[in-house]
Image: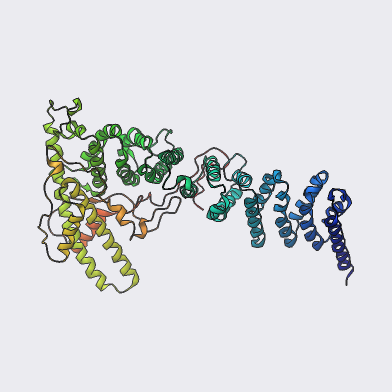
Amino acid sequence: MSENQSEEVQQIEKLYEFSERLNASKDKSQNVEDYEGIIKMSKTSMKAKQLASQLIPRYFKFFPSLSTEAFDAHMDCIDDGDLGVRVQAIRGLPLFCKDTPDIISKIVDVLVQLLNTEEPVERDAVHKALMSLLRQDPKASSTALFTHAGVTPTTDDQIREKVLNFIRDKVFPIKGELLKPQEEMERHITDLIKQSLEDVTGGEFKMFMDFLTSLSIFGGKAPPERMQELVEIIEGQADLNAQFDVSDTDHIDRFISCLQLALPFFARGAPSSRFLNYLNKHIVPVFDKLPEERKLDLLKALADISPYTTAQEARQMLPSIVQLLKKYMPARKTGEEMNFTYVECLLYAFHHLAHKVPNATNSLCGYKIVTGQPSDRLGEDFSELNKEFTERLTTVEDLTKATMKKLTQGMSEHNKAMSAAKTDEEKASVKTKKQNTTTGLRTCNNILAMTKVNISTSCLFVCFLLFRRGKLSLGTNCYMKQPLHAKVPSFIGDTNINLSWKEATKPLASATTTIGGKRPASSNNGSGNNVAAKKGRVSGAMHSQLVNKAFEGISAYGGGRGGNRSWGRRGGGRGRGQGRGHW
């Protein structure tokens, strides 16, 4: 045995002697020399350091006068050049808190800094040590951990990212085990998350919201006040107090993504007034100035939120919606192009708003709806408005039915192409075209269902299926003239109309929406569904061009450029506004 090995053996034996005397002692605080000996041995050989790293925290509580010296010695082991020593010292950190919980925050801070290690074994030891502390004292440990999840002027972005990953991957999945007593701890963790949201990316915010909605205090039996609390959190991220800048695409993306997140809570009773007011006062008036790739996303957002308006909000929004409708419903014989998805969105919003305040449409569309209120304005002549509005409706219907014929012809061509396709790539391409054509048909069906509501959307789609089976000719009219053409029309106030892009999200890979994700390479540019009002039979090549132009951008929210959007951090603090993206 070498001299060094012999010395190391003696050091180990000495440490065991110190430990045995401390174990046997009834009043361990009297064994100061033994504990000092352990501290001293932590500065010797590698194996002695490993053993001392176990013994220093074990007897730490008995020697408060040596606490600083003992802790510094242990930290020296954590900074040691040998991996085995570091790992053993990390494993010993939770033992410091077992009987001295007042230092949990300090120990968590140490472990958080160690999350940045590149050594897998060392990182695993850090994770286990943090989990041990969270189980010992969930409230104090989570509080200390979340101080590193927010952004401050001294925040280390790399460390913060590691903390967020740890919270996401290790803490959130076992919330049922850690959050006890349940209601108290769920409320505590909710407050911690709120404090961490001042400056987050889209992906980070989505992660936190997904976790909050999984808590029992926000579950299915939660009262509307809890839903309102979640909406208020989302409103804070949407920057609804900020001045709207049409060139700030980051703000637009944040607004749309936040509105999406809030929709389920609107359906459960939370008020949508702040989002609606911001849309009506700041965004709709400058709609023409918005980037083209954002217009479709905002109209989809408008359609989605329209069922959750109050009568007062509906009355305030209807004039702007009618003006947009007139802009995108072509007048007869003008040769204007029609964006079908724009019209679908606006008709849907129009129906839901008008259902809340039907007589408001008298002065906007020339209808004759009687409610007995002065707002009926029945003594005024709005006949020209009615004539213009119904003419535009007729033009929309004619263009929609013509486009349906072309789409139906295109489906036959796609079926032939699928039979002829030999490679997987060719088959995938044809499959995507078929799916987009089907989505286009849904859009057309929805438009006709909303202009001639006497037949349901499902019945309209049955007409298409009957045509596919040879039961109907292309000239057959499945639609019954009525509601929006009548002087006293009917307005849709339920959710029987399934918006086309929602149905299309399931089969289309490009339609997947993940806040904070990257834009799929195959996603469309969201510029809309522009089809010129042309008549007659088109060739296969021209048909494909028309179909592509007609329904590009039909997919999920952000089927165009807005899809899978992420927003950067909003500014303030170290490194803010740099758009970290999603991790």
Say whether residue 553 is visible: no
Residue 539 percent location from the top left of the image: 17, 62
Q: Determine the residue positioned at 13% across, 66% down.
A: 470
Vertical side of 71 occupied by 438: above or below: below
* Residue drawn at x 34%, y 69% as measured from the top left: 425
> In the rendered view, does 405 fall on the left or right side of 124?
left
Q: Residue at x 36, y 42 (%)?
A: 266
- Give 313 or 473, whichever is nearer the viewer: 313
Residue 246 appears at what percent x and percent y? 37, 38
Image mark count: 0
Give the x, y percent position of residue 23.
Answer: 82, 57
- Say whether residue 447 is visible: yes
Where is residue 348? Give x, y as percent.
25, 44
In-front residue for pair 49/270 = 270
317 with respect to 75 (left or right) = left
- In the picture, which quadrant includes the N terminus? bottom right
359 or 46, nearer to the observer: 359
Going 15% across and 62% down the picture, which residue do you hit?
Answer: 467
Image coloring type: rainbow
